[in-house]
Each structure stands twice: as structure tokens, then as C-alpha cells.
Amino acid sequence: MLSTPFFVFCLLLTTALIGVAGEYFKPFNVSYDHRAIVIDGHRRMLISAGIHYPRATPQMWPSLIAKSKEGGADVIQTYVFWSGHEPVKGKYYFEGRYNLVKFVKLVGSNGLYLHLRIGPYVCAEWNFGGFPVWLRDVPGIEFRTNNEPFKREMQRFVKKIVELMREENLFSWQGGPIIMLQIENEYGNIEGAYGQKGKDYVKWAANMAVGLGAGVPWVMCQQVDAPEFILDACNGYYCDSFRPNSKKKPMLWTENWDGWFASWGGAIPHRPVEDLAFAVARFFQRGGSFQNYYMYFGGTNFGRTSGGPNYITSYDYDAPLDEYGLLSQPKWGHLKDLHAAIKLCEPALVAADSPQYMKLGPQQEVHVYRGNITQGLTTAFSTSKSVCAAFLANIDEHKAADIEFLGQVYTLPPWSVSILPDCRHVAFNTAKVGAQTSIKLVDFNLPSSKMNVPQPLTFQDEVTYIANDWMTLKEPIGLWSKNNFTSLSIMEHLNVTKDKSDYLWYTTRLYISEDEISFWEENEVSPELSIDSMRDLVRIFINGKLSGSAKGDWIKVVHPIQLVQGYNDIVLLSETVGLQNYGAFLEKDGAGFKGRIKLTNSKNGDVDLTESSWTYQVGLKGEFQKLYTREKAESVRWMKLTPDATPSIFSWYKTYFDAPVGTDPVVLNLGSMGKGQAWVNGHHIGRYWDLISPKDGCRPCDYRGAYSSEKCTTNCGNPTQIWYHVPRSWLQRDQNLLVMFEETGGNPYKITINTISAQTICGRVPETHYPPLHIWGHPDFINGKISINDMTPELHLQCEDEHTISSIEFASYGTPQGNCQNLSKGNCHAPNSLSVVSQACQGRNSCSIAVSNDVFGDPCRGIVKTLSVQARCLPSSFARSASM
Ligand SMILES: *[C@@H]1O[C@H](CO)[C@@H](O)[C@H](O)[C@H]1NC(C)=O
Ligand SMILES: *[C@@H]1O[C@H](CO)[C@@H](O)[C@H](O)[C@H]1NC(C)=O
Ligand SMILES: *[C@@H]1O[C@H](CO)[C@@H](O)[C@H](O)[C@H]1NC(C)=O
Ligand SMILES: *[C@@H]1O[C@H](CO)[C@@H](O)[C@H](O)[C@H]1NC(C)=O
Ligand SMILES: *[C@@H]1O[C@H](CO)[C@@H](O)[C@H](O)[C@H]1NC(C)=O
């Protein structure tokens, strides 16, 4: 099957030969020309998958990389997270989720390349953009400009990473997977703020990077003034009109935003896959050669790693692999088909120096790539072969278009691209999705103590709370240790906390005279506490009682307070919820309070409290005691929490729980809680918050037309996040410790632990759909013995690994209607539909069914038939016991 010239050629290009032990590839050099990245002498069209290693666990990495490869990726792209690798200045950390070497080696051992974006500023919706917070304390430092202290620190870290990679033989010329690096990140977006110093910094950064002798190309993204020896690249939703700043550089897309991140209290953005595929196809159509999905897997902002302002713990990003590493369908599958179609075009795309352009209508255009293949052929097939690939685009947002190309008419749906790997037959259209849909459900909470007892499948519908026993402890309000200190000023939050905690207590004492009280009573006014500017959250306590809270991003806060005659304790708790990660002058942004803090409506006008005596306390007592560790949690005295206790603020909760059986990803439902942080067996699973997104604002989504992050949102009127990922590798079978710190009051007795899996999968393929892309590699097709017109489309269904199709819940070949979970037969229906599909699929992990009259008979002549199927996937162990 592979003994064809076409395939031999592809093999030589794509499966870089695995080398000797310790090397993942035979050493190869990477360069580029105006058309593409050149790998070992060959131009390549590269699909890259963005995965940030610390947003998953090392135990998840193999499967994420394997699923990226199966989805058609050639390259994995990641940032390097300085704050994680150098948490304390000069003390490096490369273990656990920060084991960069292990991650890079895994990418190599899977036969994929790596694009390592060192930055070291990375943005990434990561705390402080990836900078360690100690960096702002380096004397005289100004970030990301021509500033000696900054340049010294930046160079030290970048050099450290490059040398680590070289010592481990991870560069391509050493037989490793690294083909490209990146210095800085989207600096062009803010460069103007720095004037000439910014321009000098760009030159310095470029020279410094190249001077490290890494031996592979460096990229600067969003950098129109990148020097000649550095690649510039585009980030955005669309990059087909991007042109590099030199005729000698190829067109690279470092960040294709295939979704977007979410903020506490916001809706959840989605990007329709038809539009995403359109953007990718348009990019390759118009000369692109490297495209990376930001993100292919988004994952989770564990601990306090999420950036700000106010980004949520999930970094799902609506990526092709969801937060838990499960396939997001049809996104993953449709892109897999797209990648296969682009790969079929690769010989022509790399053979041509530039496409032939044809405008075929007001909003219709064709790009044709033609060339002769002479390199890479074995002697048996040493004749030159001419190749041709074409991309047909209809950019019209509303109307389909018929366009004539090389004597044939092609119908293009609105806002779509058809890909013709042989300039004749359509292999793929971006708007026609043949891939399955998956609906993920949360259930199967079986405590492992019942593991060996066969369970009825109805068990899944019961709500099972994580525990029947909870213990609690109060967190003190205000000062709790000798580490408190006093200052006659309002100090900047990060200057005090060094971001060791989200929390900083400011306490002061205020004397109120009898006169003052009478003045308020007589004038029927109450005093107000006024803060000129504040981020991200403040809680105001007066005489030990919570008086109010405010949240925002440098907002003015004016809050009425109740004071008594005599001394009043005023306690302000300033909280960060992810440090700012984007913008110029990050080191100056800081957190907490700015300007003056005053008492207004006082008898003699405003009382300025800014220079009062303020006593400071960093963090929470429980946090610094490490209450969340098993050792500490067991050594302090907790109180029993009764199920009917009234919710209390500033409390710690503790329980033990059994892990759900099986291998499906595990989530906690924290929907019953307010705001706080949670730890499982000492692992910080992240911040949680119950903020609800605005009710209005989610609209039905149409894939057609330019995308923006507000265009297609869901979850309006609901809490932004209730499910929190607990990686399997952090769990043991039973006696898992869950510790939570809760600020606003919640009910831990309502917390559930669940597993997530794609239980319902649906496929819908019309008989007019394209045949599966693998047939393009079939020798009979290549030799012209069979025509593509003789091939039938297929409906493909696949459960996740270790899951089995347990039943077919719906199947109709004819004119079925409705969407997944709401399917119905139409007027035309082949009566054998269910039995044919059940026979082919039931009991298997995956199955394919040809969509044609040959299989089902013809239930209605002259009408276009569609096969629509809904199937149920169960963990293979359940499916087996269910059928017993
Ligand atoms: C890569 O390039 C270097 C410098 O030109 C050369 O010495 C080396 O042999 C090349 N390696 C390979 C594998 O082509
Ligand atoms: C391919 O080769 C043929 C014959 O050598 C030549 O006529 C033709 O121009 C070549 N096509 C391209 C696109 O280079
Ligand atoms: C605050 O610090 C002072 C000075 O170290 C100490 O005397 C006092 O006990 C501390 N307060 C608390 C509540 O620990
Ligand atoms: C933070 O502390 C540094 C050094 O102590 C000081 O120079 C700087 O002004 C402080 N920043 C703010 C915003 O107070
Ligand atoms: C289910 O499908 C029917 C027919 O296709 C449609 O009329 C109905 O609105 C759908 N119901 C839901 C809940 O989507």
C-alpha cells in the first residue's frame, strides 16, 4: 500500500528517521527560505499544537502529545515559564509539572518537533506574564526595555534554558526535537510605549538570543521590526493577510486563537470549528507555511498560576483537547481532516515558490500551487512528477457560490475553503463537518470501596456528595502572627506580599469622638470609607465585622461604614486574583491600593487615613501553617461541622474521600462554595469563585463572518466555573485529603466528586460528503485504477480510550432530523439502519460505516440521504459487566 512514488515521497519527508539510542531523530539542520521552514533540506508545511506543560501533569503529557500527533500535528509549541522555573532568585526548579526536559524528550520520542518559546515574558494569561515576582525588586529594573538590570536577568534565564536544552541534546542538530525558539513575545504591541529604548531593546534581545548559538531559528511574534536574522510571525484569529517583514522570510502563524480564556463572572467563549478551519485553510491558501493552535490543549491554571485581571482556574480555551485532555468534538476531528487535506497538498505547496492567483468572483478566489517533484524519490521512481494543489475560497459571509475552475464547477458554502490536493477533486471543505460530536457528561461516581461489586448502571443518576463528615477551623480576621509590622503609609500590595499569598491585611485604629457621632446623627449622614483606586478585591471589616467588599481593576471604592464612639478597628483585606499579565510597565502596575484612603462625611471634612499608623499582615494563618498538608491537617484541632451549620466566612474545611473508580478525569463540583482555594493531598488545585456571568449576552452562534471572543459565548446566567479538575495522579484509592479555604461562606456538604467522559457521541454524514481522506493514499487511487467518484463517504465513531460503544441509541439512513440528543427519523428512513449500525459498532471502541445505498438499500430514490447516529460510550469495564 505504501509502495507508490507519492507515498515514498511523503514518508521520506514526514517520518524523520528515528536515530540511535538517546537521539529522537537523525541530527538535522533547520533553516528557512521565503516559502517555508526548511528541515534537513526540505521545505515543510507544519501544523503545530500549543500545549503548556505546567497546565497539565507529567502523567497527562504522553496522552496529550499522542492525541496531538493523531490529530495531525507535526510540532508541539510551548512557552517556558520563568516564574515556575526560578521561584526564588538563583534557585532553579525543573521537577514535576516544570520538568521541561522530560516534556521535550516526550515530544521527541513521539516523533514530533518542538517550538520552544522562551520569552521569558510570555503573557499566556499566566501570573505576572510568567515573570517571577522577585524580578520587580531588582534595583533599578524596568521590564522589557533597554534597561541593564532587566537585560542581565533576562539573558541569564534565557541562557540557562538554551544551555539546558543543549546539555540534554535536544536541538535538532543534536538529534533532538527543537526546531525553533522564540525570544520576547508580542513586544511589537507595546513597543511604542518605550520610544527609542524599546527599539534598542528589540535589537539587543535579537542579538543576545542569536549569540547563544542554539543553532536553530529564532522567532519574534508580532514584531514588524524584527531584524533580518530573526523570523517575525503573526498572532491572531486570522493571519492570511500577514506578510513577514522581509522577502526572505516565510509566513508563520505562532498563535491561531482557536478559542479564548474566561474571567470570573464572565461567559465562556467558543470558536466554531468551521470558522477555525476556514482561517487555517486561508492561511495555507495564501502562502502560509507554519501554523500553531493557541491552544491545542489549554489545561488548568493550578495553584495561583492564573494571570489577571481575574482569570479563572480552567484554561480550557475551547481547544481541540479539553481541559482534561479529552477530545473536544467535532473540533478535534474536523481539524484532523483539515490537516490530512493540507498534508495531501504538501508536495505541491512546497514545490511552488508562490501560488498562481485567480479572482473568480467579487468574494471568490483560487490559489493554485504547481511544481515538479524531483527530490526525495527512490531510484525506482526517479522520474519527475508534476504536482498541483488548489484552494478555492468563498469569503462571502452569507451566500454560497458556484465557481468554475479548470473546466469544472464547484459549489462552495459561505465563508468556506475547498481543498483540492490534485487540482480536481475536493478532499475537504472547511464548512462541511464530517467528524463526530461528543457530549460530555459528568457522573459515574463510584467509591473505590465498591470497586469489585458490580454496580447497576442507574447508579450514575444519584447525586453522591464527596463526604458525610466535614471538619472546620476559623481563620483569624486581621493580625495573626509576630510577623506583622507597622508603617505610617499605605504600602503597595506586592511590595509587601512578594506574591507569597493573595492576601494582605491592612489594619488601623480610629478614634471617634462623641461630637462626631452627634454630627452624623444630626445631619443624617453616615461616614464613608473612600479608596481612590483598588484592584482586584477589597473586603472592609469594621470592629471585627465584615462591612462590605468591592472588586474591580483599579476602581474607586466608596463604602458607607458604621462607627462607634471611641476606638474603631478598621481592617482592609486586599486580595489579588492573578497578577496582571499584559501591557507595558508591568513592574509599575502593582496591586492593592493607589492614591488616598479617607474617611468622608466627617465633621471637619475628609479625614485622610493614608498616613495613619497601619499594621500589616501578609497572608492567612492556615496558608502559612500549610493546613492543607496531611501532616499539618492531622496535627491541628478541627471542629466538627454540622450539616445544618450556617455558612460562615473565613473558614477552613477538611474532609477525606475515596477516589472514583476507573480512569476518567476527576472533577470537584464546587458550585455550593463561595470564594477560596482548594487543595487535594497537598496539591493546590486552584482558586474557586462563584461569580455568575451576566444573564444576557449569549447569542446563537453562526460560524460565518469574522470571529471575535464575544461572538460565540455560552453559560450566561450561570457561575463561570463550577467544575475543578483534580488530576488522577494526585489521587490515591481512598483517604484523599481535601482542604479548602472559604472566604464568603458556602456549604461543603454539597460538594460532589465526579468523573467526566464523552458518553454520548453523534455522527452525521450525507451520502454526498467527501470520502475519507486516507483513500487518497491508496495505490489504486494514485494509479488511477479507481476514481474518487467511486468512493463512498464514511461515518466514523470513536469513544475515548478505554471506552466502548455500549449501545446505538439512534440510527437513521434517510432524512433524519435534529441535533445530537434530539434526533428523530424523517419521512425517509431505511428500516435496517439500527441493526446495520449496531452490528458494525456495538462493543467496539471505534467503527466506520459506509454511507451509501449499497449498505442500507435505497429508502427513497432521488433524494439525498444522510446517515445520522447517536451512540453511547461507556468505560470498557462497565460495558463488559453491563452486557453480562
Ligand atoms: C548542520 O550545519 C552545520 C553547519 O553548517 C554542519 O556542520 C552540520 O554538518 C550540519 N548537520 C547536518 C546533520 O546536516
Ligand atoms: C515541470 O516540468 C515540466 C517538464 O520538465 C516543465 O515543462 C514544467 O514547466 C514544470 N512545471 C513547473 C511548475 O515547474
Ligand atoms: C504583632 O507583632 C507584634 C510585634 O512583633 C507582636 O508583639 C504581636 O503579638 C503581634 N500580633 C499578633 C496578633 O500576633
Ligand atoms: C515598592 O518598594 C520599592 C522599594 O522599597 C519602592 O521604590 C517603590 O516605590 C515601591 N512601590 C510602590 C508602588 O510603592
Ligand atoms: C428537537 O428537534 C425537533 C425537530 O427537529 C425540534 O423541533 C425541536 O425544537 C428540538 N428540540 C430541542 C430541545 O432542541
Image (cartoon, rainbow, N blue to C red):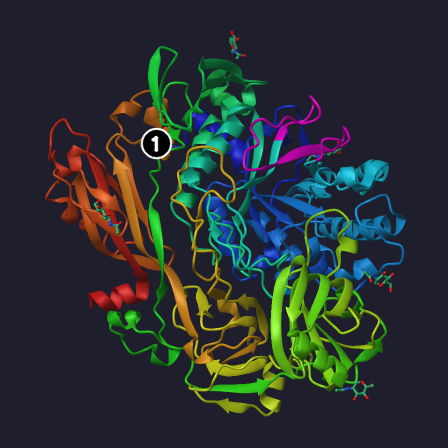
Q: Quadrant of residue 49?
A: top right
- Residue 847 seen in render: no
Q: Quadrant of residue 112?
A: top right
Q: Is residue 561 left or right of residue 205?
A: left
Q: Quadrant of residue 238?
A: top right
Q: Nearer the viewer, residue 441 or 610?
A: 610
Q: Position of residue 347 (x, y in %)?
A: 50, 24
Residue placed furthest toward the front: 522
Verify whether residue 568 appears in magenta: no
Q: Position of residue 637 (x, y in %)?
A: 59, 92
Verify whether residue 243 appears in magenta: yes
Q: What stretch of residues is rendered in magenta?
A: 223-251
Which residue shows up at 55% across the image and 73% down it?
678
**At numbered mark 1, what does the secondary structure look like: helix, strand or loop?**
helix
Residue that label 1 marks: 775
Please tell me whether residue 612 is drawn above or below residue 555 in the rendered image.
below
Which residue shows up at 53% across the image and 48% down it?
260
How busy is the neighbourhood of tag 1: few (under 14 within 10 Å), some, or many (20 plus)?
few
Which residue shows up at 47% across the image and 29% down it?
8
